[in-house]
Amino acid sequence: MDELDDVLNEPLAVGDLDELAAAVEWEAEQAQKTPEKRRSAGQETGIGHDQRLVTRTAGRRAYDLRGVPNAVRLVRPLPVPGETVHAIMGGDFHAWDLVPAIVELAACPFAELWIATLGFNLGNNGHLCRLIDQGRIQRATILCSDYFAKSDLSVFTESKAALEARGCRLVSSRNHAKVILLAPAGRKDRYVVEGSANLRSCNNLEQFALSNDRRLFDFHRSWIHQITNTC
């Protein structure tokens, strides 16, 4: 203990003081040469990686239109009045795709669209609503089956609300017919699609006939109109 006190109490020599002063001066110089590491914006503001919000947007839906070019190739050119095109669908597009295909090839707005089908999906209906909003289809009436309306109630209810908001109609009945009717605005053409396929996808062979026939158009429109006005 006495030896330790002697060391602590021992006075510093002049050389030791010079050496200590030099060390302090060197540390000060190094501090000036090495600036303090800059803090990130998140550290300075307190807004770091824990600031996060997850949202789910209702109504945002993508429409799969990859099959439309296949439908276009199959029905191009559109039949002239009095002509019918017969075709087989190989599962590379939906029956709904015939609608935008005909609209695209005709290159004009359509005053009327009438559809009889067993069922459809939200993608079909969403694309129809977009065509209506774009003015490419002015009025639409859809007849589906009671079975579909009950088994896919959420799809039916949502689609019905969306169409009625646009002044169009969606009605269900004991229907199993598959017909699409398209009437261009200001033109004499009347396109009629009669086939085995529903609007939504079905990876089976299907057949359809595409006619440009006013009498056939009026025949199918009459019974669809009768059912949709009484249900």
Image (cartoon, helix red, strand yellow):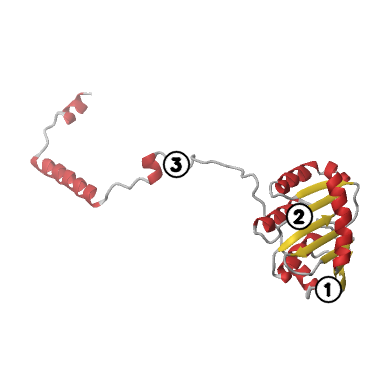
Q: Nearer the viewer, residue 195 or 90?
A: 195
Q: Nearer the observer, disc 2 or disc 3?
A: 2
> From this viewpoint, is residue 91 visible?
yes
Quadrant for residue 205, please give it. bottom right
Residue identified by numbered label 3: 48
Quadrant for residue 83, please give it. bottom right
Asked if the residues shown at circle 1 and circle 3 are in contact, with their CB atoms under 8 angstroms apart, the answer is no
Disc 2 packing (10 Å; few <14; some 14–19; many ≥20): many
Assign a secondary structure to mark 2. Answer: strand
Horizontally, residue 144 falls left or right of residue 128, namely right
Assign a secondary structure to mark 1. Answer: loop
Horizontally, residue 210 falls left or right of residue 139, namely right
Residue identified by numbered label 2: 140
Q: What's the residue type where badge 3 is placed?
A: Gly
Quadrant for residue 113, please give it. bottom right
User: On the rendered image, what quadrant is the C terminus found in?
Assistant: top right
Disc marking residue 81: 1
User: On the rendered image, what quadrant is the N terminus found in?
Assistant: top left
Which is nearer the N-term, disc 2 or disc 1? 1
> From this viewpoint, is residue 118 visible?
no
**In the rendered image, the vertical position of residue 131 relative to residue 175, given as above or below:** below
